Image (cartoon, rainbow, N blue to C red):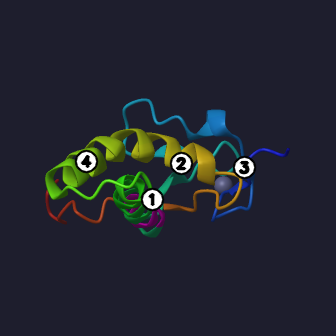
Amino acid sequence: MAGPNYVCPKCGFNLRPPHLRREGKPYFLCPSCNEKLRVSVAYRRFLLFGGIVISVALPFVLGIRDVLTFVVVAMLAFFPVGFLLPFLLRSIYPARFEPYSPEFIKKGLF
Ligand SMILES: [Zn+2]
């Protein structure tokens, strides 16, 4: 099976997973055009939403009907689901990237 199809939104370079390491920074660099990139906000929202849906579905599928147990199982499930989901999804719906721009840094700061 082919690896995830990650593409630089600027130059179309085929990014490989080792290229995506951020090394503590909020972005990573495209090895082809040196653009600062990050996983798109829309994709991260999608992952979060998917993680919540699966976490809530899990105790339901397990047949848990006690409200407290249901909530506890859903909350506990969220962490492994949130961790595994990007790996499960990456061949079906690989992460999208967008240029990293520090839009939250106010002008005139320097
Ligand atoms: Zn690029």
Circle 4 Cα neighbour tier, 10 Å, few/some/many (<14 / 14–19 / ≥20) = some
Magenta segment boundaries in residue numbering: 43-48
| Residue that extends furthest to the top in the rendered view of this protein | 23
Residue annotated with mark 2 = 86
Circle 3 Cα neighbour tier, 10 Å, few/some/many (<14 / 14–19 / ≥20) = some
Residue annotated with mark 1 = 47
Q: Earlier in the sequence, mark 2 or mark 4?
A: 4
In depth, the one of 5 and 29 nearer the eye is 5
81 sits to left or right of 14: left
Q: Is residue 101 above or below residue 16?
A: below
- Looking at the rendered structure, the kind of residue marked 2 is Pro
At 53% from the left edge and 34% from the top edge, which residue is drawn? 21
Q: Nearer the viewer, mark 4 or mark 1?
A: 4
Q: Earlier in the sequence, mark 4 or mark 1?
A: 1
Query: What distance separates the C-alpha of mark 2 from that of mark 4?
Result: 18 Å
Badge 4 element: helix
Q: Nearer the viewer, mark 3 or mark 4?
A: 4
Q: Nearer the viewer, mark 2 or mark 4?
A: 4
